[in-house]
Image: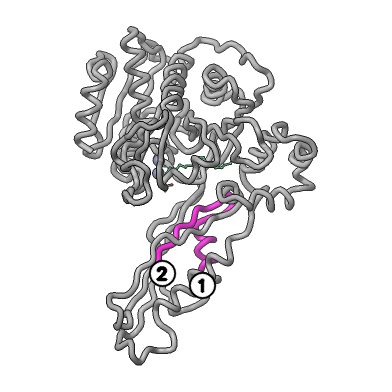
Amino acid sequence: MAEFGNYIQEVFPAVFSSKFIQHEIVGKYSHLFTVQGSDPGLLPYMLLAHMDVVPAPPEGWDFPPFSAAEHEGFIYGRGTLDNKNSAIGILQALEFLLRRNYRPRRSFYVGIGHDEEVFGRKGAMTMAALLEARGVKLSFLLDEGSAILHGVVAGVEKPVAVIAITEKGSITLNFTVEKEPGHSSFPPRESSIGILAAAMARLEQNPLPSLFGHGPELLTMEHLASEFRFPLNLIMSNLWLFSPIVSRVLAWKPPTNALIRTTTAVTMFNAGIKLNVIPSSAKATVNFRIHSAETAAEVLEAVRNTVADNRVKIDIVEAFDPLPVSPWDDQTFGVHIFQRTILDIFPDVDSVVPGTCIGNTDSRHFTNVTKAIYRFNPLLLKSDDLPRIHGLNERISVESYEKQVEFLFQLIQNCDIQRLPEPHANSHEL
Ligand SMILES: CCCCCCCC/C=C\CCCCCCCC(=O)NCC(=O)O
Ligand SMILES: [Zn+2]
Ligand SMILES: [Zn+2]
């Protein structure tokens, strides 16, 4: 982490030597930049990213996950999509602007967290507390969490920019079964492993119900309606009638299933120490991502009812409710800026629609400094790209990275325009 700090100082000299940029190290390794605009009357905004990554076992990768190998126009490596692309992309865009002697009118903050993948407690939380203590109010905050999607939603053929206006809640539970250990030659009828495995199977086989129509996914589908061909466009425009069918279609694929319900993911399972010893305990961890219309307490209650076995002890690792919904209308400065900048840099994007971030981001710690939190990575993602995030062969194309830098370069300048002209393509809707 410290080395990364040295690296950015070396490769972005204009950022680190600018008279109007203050750089602070927060929570030991995170970076907070305050870019002082020339007009102090304008409300500042914030660009957020993170430098930490999830682990990457080398097996199964075409190129070593920490090599940044370039092959056929793609850079392979853990973090290329989540979220070194934003961390480096923001600084790269700022460096380019400074080298052209650009002085922003509107102040802004750049936050690069170092512990997003472990809840952002030291990085993002401390940066947010610092801003709050300084009395900062942001006009908007932009973080990772959604993208330009192409071929991800069944029936939508053109690329659509989905800007997440909220993110799901989360509850992680540890499940433990304790039993008397002993010799495997005279085993008990049920082992701790068998009891726990059965409980996990019940959780997987009884997913939480679809809540389609009770959260912001309804808004997403309404905004996407015109992207579907006949008769799907009619169906999407009349969700009051067709929502049960739409809900079933969305449930087919994991990324859209995640939009309509609280998801259940068994992520860790441990038991046993030797082949001829009955294990004394078995442990599992399950991560639930909570739909906007549900709370962590409700999910816990539903889980207890499904497990329905007192021998399975349940402990909460972490829990938080879904995040508030940010404004989505063309009077909102950030929304206007995103729409305009997407039109400038991605002319093939057919619609800009509000969505839900199905994962969690550092932005959730900033609710006290702004109500306008948006999660959007200016990257084109196809269905085949989604499993690479936290998975194998994570990669970004050189072209996509360049586009990301262009988007940020343009966004910073668009934020300084006194009165943004009307967007030039009226097929794009908000
Ligand atoms: C009509 C919209 C369909 C939505 C389909 C899903 C689109 C997926 C787009 C982007 C990928 C989501 C990544 C979420 C970012 C999460 C960052 C992260 O890893 N945080 C930690 C965590 O959540 O555990
Ligand atoms: Zn991330
Ligand atoms: Zn991640």
Q: CA gap, disc 2 to disc 1?
A: 10 Å
- Quadrant in which residue 159 is drawn: top right
Q: Tell me if I can see residue 190 in this picture.
A: yes
Report the residue marked by disc 1: 307
Reply above or below: 96 against 267.
above
Q: Is residue 315 visible?
A: no
User: Which region of the structure is painted magenta?
Assistant: 284-304
Q: Residue at x 31, y 42 (%)?
A: 64
Quarter of the image where one finds residue 156: top right
Q: Is mark 2 in CB contact (under 8 Å) with mark 1?
A: yes
Of mark 2 and mark 1, the one earlier in the sequence is 2
Find disc 2 in the rendering and name its residue.
175
* Residue 289 coordinates in the image, percent (x, y): 50, 53
Q: Secondary structure at mark 2?
A: strand
Where residue 149 sits: x, y (%)? 56, 35
Q: Is mark 1 within 8 Å of ligand 1?
A: no
Nearest to the observer: residue 97 or residue 331: 97
Q: Quadrant of the C terminus?
A: top right
Tell whether 21 sits left or right of 40.
left
Query: Between 412 and 245, which is closer to the camera in this rendering?
Result: 245
Q: Which residue is rendered at x = 30% and y = 25% of the image?
A: 33
Residue at the image position 58 percent from the left and 34 percent from the top: 150
In the rendered image, the vertical position of residue 17 relative to residue 310, given as above or below: above
- 427 with respect to 309 (left or right): right
Query: Residue sitting at 76 percent across and 36 percent down?
Result: 233
Q: Is residue 394 left or right of residue 150?
A: left
Q: Position of residue 209 (x, y in %)?
A: 62, 59
Q: Residues within 10 Å of mark 1 (few under 14, many from 20)?
A: many
Q: Is residue 290 magenta?
A: yes
Q: Amino acid at mark 1?
A: Val
Identify the amino acid type marked 2: Phe
Q: Nearer the viewer, residue 83 or 322?
A: 83
